Image (tube, rainbow, N blue to C red):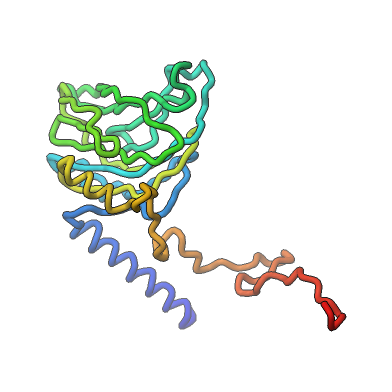
Amino acid sequence: MSFATQIIFGIILILIALYIVFYVIYPSSGNDDVLRHMTPLNEKKDILMSDVTKNKILGSAGSTVMGFLKFGAGDRTANYNDRFTPFLQVENNWFVEVSQAPTASNANTRAAARLRVKTNDGGAIKEEIIDLPEIPKQKWVFIAVLRDGRRFDVIYDNKLVASQRLENYPVVMSSPLSVGNKGLDGSVIHVIINGKRLSPTDVERERLAYIDTNNTVLEDNSIDMSFPSIKLFARCPSGLPCDPITKPPNNNLFQWKSPYA
């Protein structure tokens, strides 16, 4: 093993050790932004590993999950009127879902939504539904899911839109936190978690920290150092006519020979 390879593997081990220390052994007790960059909603993406999700979102008496979402035009096919697609979920536990086809009266601007929670009824798994108001389309909406034991509260921007106490306690099963799904149209950013139930005032304070005076959502411009995005071994496959990743692109501009150009 070369010296350079040893350094690379040493850096990887240090990053893994730091992750374990800060996110598993000693997770933060405050608000954690686990999705700092704009992410499309058209496919499912895990944004928090199962062990952290269980410890911080499922393992305590209360929790908060909130983030900015912007839905596009979506699917308006009438055949999907009763079909819901999760866009924010803790797999095997609870799901915030949106209807892929709103009714004709609100098809141009809004979509129906719900919170579906898996609960434990004396050893039998059942699903309890909390109906939610329509989610405005083509604009950023800050959605927060607050849990305190069996009670779930849902906030759109600075308005409490649903509050319901379930019949049974939610299922606690180790699962990742994920956003997006196939068939959805839109974007998500700044998914923030907390291991306790925040007050509506705390949620509004967090929302205001991520928007400017024009109500535009601010994207974190810091370098993304997450492990999956580090391409340490990227290279041109043998036998293919491609250039090394360090070579600048070809200059396609035509250089004039005349001194008057």
> For this rendering, which residue is in front, 252 or 218?
218
The residue at the point 29 percent across, 66 percent down is 17
x and y percent of residue 69 in the render? Answer: 39, 41
x and y percent of residue 15 in the render? Answer: 34, 67
- Picture quadrant where residue 85 is located: top left
> For this rendering, which residue is in front, 15 or 213?
213
x and y percent of residue 9 in the render? Answer: 41, 72
- Picture quadrant where residue 245 is located: bottom right
Check the image and report above or below for 7 versus 231: below
Instruction: From the viewer's perspective, tell me whether residue 210 is left or right of residue 111.
Output: left
> For this rendering, which residue is in front, 42 or 203?
203
x and y percent of residue 61 in the render? Answer: 12, 40
Q: Residue furthest right?
A: 258
The residue at the point 24 percent across, 49 percent down is 206
- Picture quadrant where residue 84 is located: top left
> For this rendering, which residue is in front, 106 or 168?
106
